[in-house]
Amino acid sequence: MPEAPAAPTTRNFNDNVIVEWNAPEENGEALLGYYVYLRQSNGVYTMEPIHCNGSSPDIILAKSCTIPLNTLTQSPFTLQFGPQLGEYVNVKVIAYNEYGNSNPSPIGGLARIQIVPDPPASFGYDLFQTIDTEIGLQWTDGDTIGGTPILEYIVYWDQGAANGVFVLLRGEITL
């Protein structure tokens, strides 16, 4: 049977999580595939058979699979309370050949369950912070911040022309 694979890695790419691993030593017989297990919200590991089917020739060759984030926020990964935004996607991989299954890899995963945050709510002018050369703005975060802290806001303005053309507001924005 094959050796256990090294710990897989996970990374976010757009609205997906990419799971990658290295092929282990085969020990005399070619690998037939992989079992890729992802942690559910209750701590139990389960396979994701649609996007990460380890018997697929493409996945065997690439030693990676791409899972949409919305898959990880649905059953069976959600179970009772669902994975929380910001949680890490934990994965373990088992390789198999005609001799049997390897031991599981160590658990790996650096990707987080995150989504694009909602737009800010209650956006408006802050008259008390506005002076001759500065415009004060205020807003509150939207309902969902996406699972990780918001790092920056990008503000556009229409230069008062009301023509639908917005320009990136340059300057310091204090969070």
Image (cartoon, grey):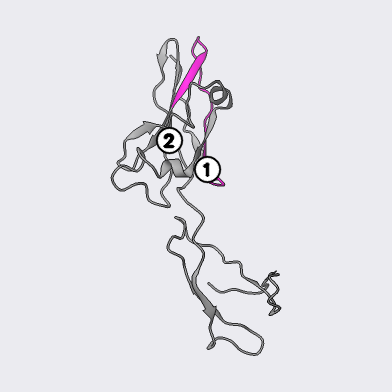
Q: Tell me if residue 34 is in the magenta stretch.
A: yes
Residue 131, percent from left and from top = 61, 89
Q: Nearer the viewer, residue 119 or 22?
A: 119
Report crowding for label 2: few under 14, some 14 to 19, many 20 or more residues within 10 A (C-alpha).
many
The quarter in which the N terminus is drawn is top left
Q: CA distance from mark 2 to mark 1?
A: 15 Å
Q: Please name the residue that numbered disc 2 is placed on.
A: 91
Kind of element beneath mark 1: strand
Q: Amino acid at mark 2?
A: Val
Amino acid type, mark 1: Asn
Q: Residues within 10 Å of mark 1 (few under 14, many from 20)?
A: many
The quarter of the picture where residue 102 lies is: top left
Q: Earlier in the sequence, mark 2 or mark 1?
A: 1
Q: Taking 51 as reference, is 101 above or below it?
A: above
Residue holding disc 1: 16
Give the residue displayed 40% in from the left and 13% down from the top: 100
Residue at horizontal 49 percent and vertical 61 percent from the top: 118
- Residue 19 in picture, x, y percent from top left: 51, 35
Q: Position of residue 47 (x, y in %)?
A: 40, 30
Q: Residue at x 53, y 78 (%)?
A: 124
Specify start and end residues of the magenta stretch as a single range: 11-35
Residue 71: horizontal and vertical position, in percent? 44, 40
Residue at 47% x, 67% y is 141
**Would you place residue 171 above or below residue 84 in this image?**
below
